[in-house]
Amino acid sequence: MTLEVRDVYKSFGQVRAVQGVSFTVPEGRVCGLLGSNGAGKTTTMRIIMRIFLPDRGEIRWQGRPVTDAVRASFGYLPEERGLYPKMQVREQLIYLTQLKGHTQAEAARQVDLWIDRLELGEYARRKVEQLSKGNQQKVQFAAAAASRPALCILDEPFTGLDPMNTLVMEQAFRTLAAEGTTILFSSHNMDQVEALCDDVVLIHRSRVVLAGSLREVKRSARRQTVRLRVESGDYGFLREFPGIRTQSATGGAIEIAVPEGLDPNRLLARALQTGTVTEYSLGEPSLREIYIEKVGGADA
């Protein structure tokens, strides 16, 4: 049940929203769609959902072109909330799930399951307009998930959530994925994407600049990351190595982005000359670092 986005173009007047966008999301995988505001993420999702039709290119699901009938089986959480503000939460979710072809009894069973998972029980009989923005977002997620879609498209699903509700939503997100739903979602939170995704697609200025499994993307990065802690706290020696970037880490350590061509062992040797090294580890760059490497200079 692979989702295929094939060489898709879309313009609005003189604005080229997406240009030659291609990627695949394999069955049962979670794919994070990354990019700055205006990069083309939402447009791409709306093309998959046939809200927009591409100027060129094709969207395929299970090897066949996506039609309106096929699209109707997808779960979708839009960037703007698409709920009826005057309807009660449970009543509305049952109605929306029935529209996906479920009987009232099956819709009610699935809705109650997701209301419980998302800790919405005390709000089930309230009107949507009486809920906080965060709880409205959770209701929107339930509307996308309750029909048990094979494919779910989620545009910024964690927007507006406080830390506790974010944890609840992340767990519900993992549950949806564990039940076999293929998921494509967009987010600005790199740490969150890294924690939740199997695959990533990075769109920059309407074009895909990176796509693949998270593991492949990290292994293909041209540099490594060093975590270092010198007891004295003196890291001035790092100025001797051009091209490196540092940021503070927990426990008084720093994380160093090592540029291509620099042997990380040179950093260790120099640190040992400076003082007592209490921590040194070498690892792959974070998704945030890879993102900055790919587009940071162009966005600056």
Image (cartoon, grey):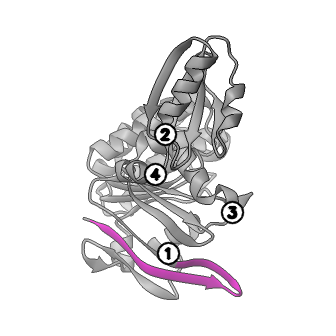
Q: Position of residue 206 (x, y in %)?
A: 59, 72
193 in magenta: no
Nearer to us of marks 3 and 2 is 2
User: Residue visible at 58% across and 44% down?
Assistant: 189
Asked if labels 2 and 1 touch by Cβ distance under 8 angstroms, the answer is no
Q: Kindly identify which residue carries mark 4.
A: 221
Q: Position of residue 246 (x, y in %)?
A: 65, 35
Q: CA distance from mark 4 to mark 3?
A: 18 Å
Residue 47's disc number: 1
Q: For numbered disc 3, what is the local secondary structure?
A: helix
Q: Earlier in the sequence, mark 2 or mark 4?
A: 4
Q: Which residues are magenta?
A: 2-19
Q: CA distance from mark 2 to mark 4?
A: 15 Å
12 in magenta: yes
Q: For numbered disc 1, what is the local secondary structure?
A: helix
Q: Position of residue 140 (x, y in %)?
A: 52, 50
Q: Is residue 217 above or below residue 61?
A: above
Q: Earlier in the sequence, mark 3 or mark 1?
A: 1
Q: Kindly identify which residue carries mark 2.
A: 263
Q: Kindly identify which residue carries mark 3.
A: 298
User: Residue visible at 48% across and 48% down?
Assistant: 141
Q: Earlier in the sequence, mark 3 or mark 2?
A: 2
10 Å crowding of disc 3: few (<14), some (14-19), many (20+): few
At label 3, the amino acid type is: Ala
Asked if labels 4 and 1 touch by Cβ distance under 8 angstroms, the answer is no
